[in-house]
Amino acid sequence: MNKIIDGLINLCRWPAAMICLCFLPALIESYRHFNFYNKEFYCFGAGIAFFWIVAFCVGSQVRHQIQIIAHELTHTLFAILTLHFVKKIRLNPDGSGGSMQLSGHGNWLIILAPYFFPLFAALYMLIMPFLLRVSDNHWLVYAVFGYFTAYYWETVLSQVHAEQSDIIRCGYVFSGIIIVCFNLFVTGSIFAFVRHSWHGLELYWQLIYKLAAEHYGLVQNLFGQYL
């Protein structure tokens, strides 16, 4: 079964890249539709600032080790989602990296997932609505989300470089398109989640579609401020 899934995903490799490029102007423009001047974003921003303070104070070696673990776990998650059996996860003793062995040949989604998927932030999103219901300290809930989001940004920035084996394996052009577009989309989705929880994702995805349609002359008008 995973061979069929891999074949379909790899077959959609360049079509997916072309779709990403078509949506790129809409993704960039979508950031103009956010209202950042509210208490949720202030608390979220405080968590981001706290992360960079901690990153400055904590040794880079510790952060690097955690990033490697998250990197391999993200490979693993997308391997499982595409119905692969994960045989082994290995971390190099010298802290230089790690590897994940799976059944089958894999696909580009598994290979590039760590460079656009915010593992810890995504897991936190699953419990964040519950935390907001049961906690009186909403500012702390949003701040923690900001912390995990900043961690995701720092991880992507530190791991995307010309010598990265995963990027070389998928090709610089294809990897660049996917990583840039997917990160814009993921970050926008996170901002939308801050404002309106899961409903915010629906609003944001509708906004992306409408902005893209406007760029290609399919509609004439947009709704007002969405988020």
Image: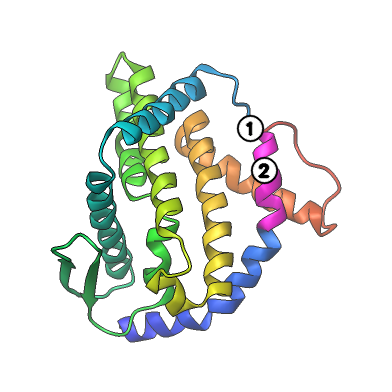
Q: Nearer the viewer, residue 32 or 165?
A: 165
Q: Look at the image and give the residue range highlighted in magenta.
A: 24-33
Q: Is residue 31 above or below residue 168?
A: above
Tag count: 2
Question: Residue 30: which numbered mark, if any?
Answer: 2
Q: Is residue 128 above or below residue 161?
A: above
Q: Main secondary structure of the magenta part?
A: helix
Q: Secondary structure at mark 2?
A: helix
Image spot of residue 13 (x, y percent): 53, 77
Question: Residue at horizontal 31%, vertical 13%?
Answer: 136
Question: Residue at horizontal 45%, vertical 56%?
Answer: 116
Question: Residue 34: which numbered mark, if any?
Answer: 1
Taking the magenta stretch, the answer to whether it contains residue 27 is yes
Can residue 9 be spotted in the picture? no
Contact flag, marks 2 and 1 (Cβ < 8 Å): yes
Question: Residue 80: which numbered mark, if any?
Answer: none
Image spot of residue 11 (x, y percent): 51, 83
Taking the magenta stretch, the answer to whether it contains residue 104 is no
